Amino acid sequence: MRTKIFTAGVGALAMMAAVQPLAAADMPAKAPILKAPPAVYNWTGFYVGANVGFSWGRAKTDLVGTEQVQVFRTAGANLVLDTGAVPIAGFSDRSNANGWLGGVQAGYNWQTGRWLFGIEADFQGTGEDSDFLHTFVIPPVLVQGVQTPATTVSVAGETKLKWFGTVRGRLGWLPTERILLYATGGLAYGRIESDYVFGLSSDGTATVNNSHTKAGYVVGGGIEGALWWDNWTVKAEYLYMDLRRFNTGGISATANLLNTPQQGFNTVTTLNASANTRFTDNIFRIGLNYHFAPGAVVARY
């Protein structure tokens, strides 16, 4: 009897073991837990910002002209000689125009893979100012047996860059998704004020004031990085700007020296000249930009 009971129990256990895999196969499988795809920073879109910086400008001024000397007898003011317009050597002067600057910028970026294409415009106010004092001597001239006196010419000049703006293209590369290296270049324009005071010997002076809005070009490059707040980026940038040459127009100064070159004569010296200046600038600035487009998008797989 006991043997039959034991045999029946073993058979029941065997049947249960055989049924278990079949039952497990019918149970629903749990879906795997997927991690959220990583966020990828996106540079595409409009942005606006502000910047501050410093510039190392250079104003190169060249003066050319002519000198005319007339000698009169003091009694009766009779003309004794007239040299006519005699070319003078003039001079060239380079002066630094350094100063702080600050302004605003706006632009748009298109990102494709690791490459970025963009356009940016900015407008800057500056405190750039250069000045110089140059003195040279026009040697005596012997005409009709009469030697004219040497003429000392002094020129004091000041050049100011009041403001400037640029419209530039940008070509960038992303070594990482949140760091941008870029080259930039395009149109530059600015307002330049120049003041000149000309002196002849100790008698004649002339003052000339000019303002010019000049156009030129600008090239440079920089680095820009996305901050922890995705809509904000910070940049450091270098630009070289050339606003080309501008001319002061005609300048005329006259000196009337009594008893020159000797007693009973007086000498009238007239300087007719023009000065032209080329303005170039080396600019370093840092800026902060706010991007209107979302800073990050979800990567698609």
Image (spheres, grey):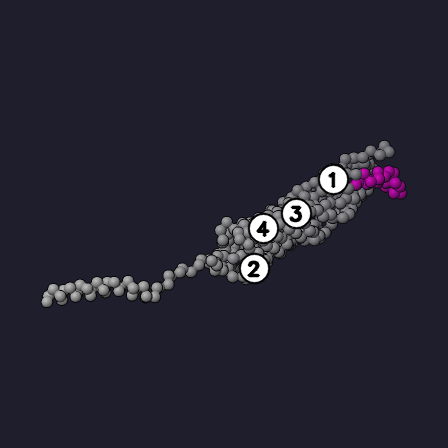
Disc 4 secondary structure class: strand
In the image, what residue type sits under mark 2?
A: Gly
| Upstream in sequence: badge 3 or badge 2 | 2
| Upstream in sequence: badge 4 or badge 2 | 2
In the image, what residue type sits under mark 3?
A: Asp
Q: What's drawn in magenta, residue-wise?
A: 66-86
Between the C-alphas of marks 3 and 2, the distance is 30 Å
| Upstream in sequence: badge 1 or badge 3 | 1
Nearer the observer: mark 1 or 3; the answer is 3
In the image, what residue type sits under mark 4?
A: Leu
The answer to whether residue 253 is left or right of residue 157 is right
Q: Which mark is residue 242?
A: 3
User: Residue 25 falls in which quadrant of the image?
Assistant: bottom left
Q: Which residue is mark 1?
A: 90
Residue that appears at 84% across and 38% down: 83
Res. 208 visible in picture: yes
Q: Position of residue 230 (x, y in %)?
A: 49, 59
Q: Position of residue 248 (x, y in %)?
A: 74, 48
Q: Are marks 3 and 2 in contact (CB under 8 Å)?
A: no
In the image, what residue type sits under mark 1?
A: Gly
The answer to whether residue 232 is left or right of residue 25 is right
Q: Which residue is mark 4?
A: 171
Q: Nearer the viewer, residue 125 or 159?
A: 125
Circle 1 packing at 10 Å, graded few (<14), some (14-19), many (20+), is some
Circle 3 packing at 10 Å, graded few (<14), some (14-19), many (20+), is many
